[in-house]
Image: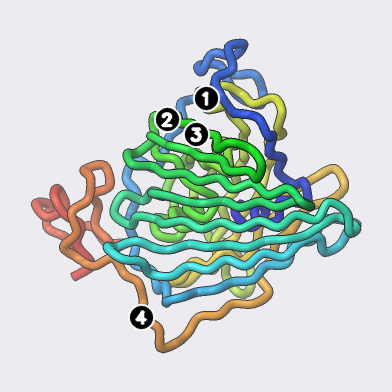
Amino acid sequence: MAILWLAHSTCLFEETDGLHAPNPEHPPTAWSAQGVSPAPVKTDPSPQIMPIDLPAPETATYRVRYGIFGQVAEATITFSPGPKRTVRASGHGNGAVLGFGKTDKRIEGEFDLQTLKTTRWTIVRQSGDEKVIDLAEQTEPGLVSLVRKREGRPDEADKFSRPSPVLDPLGLLLRLRFAPLKAPSSFEVLDGRALWVIRLSAIHATDENPPTLRLDGYAEPICWDGSPDEKRTGRDFSLFLSNDSYRTPVRLVVPYDLGEARAEIVHLSRPEAARPVRLKAPVTYPSHLCVPLCSAPEQVPPAKRQQKCFPCP
């Protein structure tokens, strides 16, 4: 999803300019695109934190095509190791449909490997002469402080609280790479001031050549209190990752009335001599994240599973 968020000018995902504050007409317990109250937002109850070969840095470039319009945008995403078991994430996207509505967008964030959440991020969006800068910080899981900066206007500071950690678009990609979903899960993602619930299937292998891993999902727009945001439109999508130790995002497909939007990787830079990022034991995790790092948990003594995460013997 982050690939298309970076290519915002294609209007594939709308972002309204107003505050996404509580909507009194819709209580938080009654929201869904179908008008049926779904189960609360759930994350994978026991994410398996898996080692990943992530060099410093890894840079991927994507080309975005939209039905009969052809190529409408391009996006570049870079991940690199940060201090104290963090990953620095940055992305840049720009594009336009038939040369109109050109938009440039940048994202920079810091992802915590121990809690699997984004701690702080900045999104800069420029369309024509208008430039909007959104700063976000998550000091505690679900507690988000925001500042919006625009030239010629006073800064807008706000905050909201959600029952689960909030991710930025790039943080969602890292969450899926470091802890592949074993069961259907949902995540909340904040883009600027627009909040989304991303509902995802369990990851499964495809028979493509080269082999890939597939996730099918639905992006549902909500307000900060969890009520539906009727100013934006939800979208189905499918995300494909490489079926190897990197789990690199290689393709994103979003169906539309005028054809599908496809973001596909066209270039990948991964220095061979760079130091890989791997979660190393012993690392103390919150109890709800405490699982072995390997795919054969029976090899790890039960006493060790309860308090710390250990690599495969």
**Residue 70 falls in image quadrant:** bottom right
What secondary structure is marked by label 2?
loop
Q: Which amino acid does label 4 sit on?
A: Arg
**On screen, 145 above or below 67?**
above
Q: Name the residue under label 2.
A: 162
What secondary structure is marked by label 3?
strand
Q: With 212 as the anchor, is 273 left or right in this view?
A: left
Q: Residue 175 carries which label?
A: none
**Residue 75 falls in image quadrant:** bottom right
Q: Reading the chain from its start, which is encountered first: label 3 or label 1?
A: 3
Q: Which residue lies furthest to the front in this view?
A: 152
The residue shown at (74%, 59%) is 262
Q: Name the residue under label 3.
A: 157
Total numbered circles: 4
Image location (x, y in percent) of residue 163:
39, 29
The residue shown at (63%, 73%) is 209
Query: From mark 1 to mark 2, how far is it between C-alphas?
Result: 8 Å
Badge 1 vs badge 2, beta-carbon distance below 8 Å: yes
Q: Which amino acid does label 3 sit on?
A: Ala
Q: Residue 275 carries which label?
A: 4
Q: Reading the chain from its start, which is encountered first: label 4 or label 2?
A: 2
Q: Which amino acid does label 1 sit on?
A: Gly
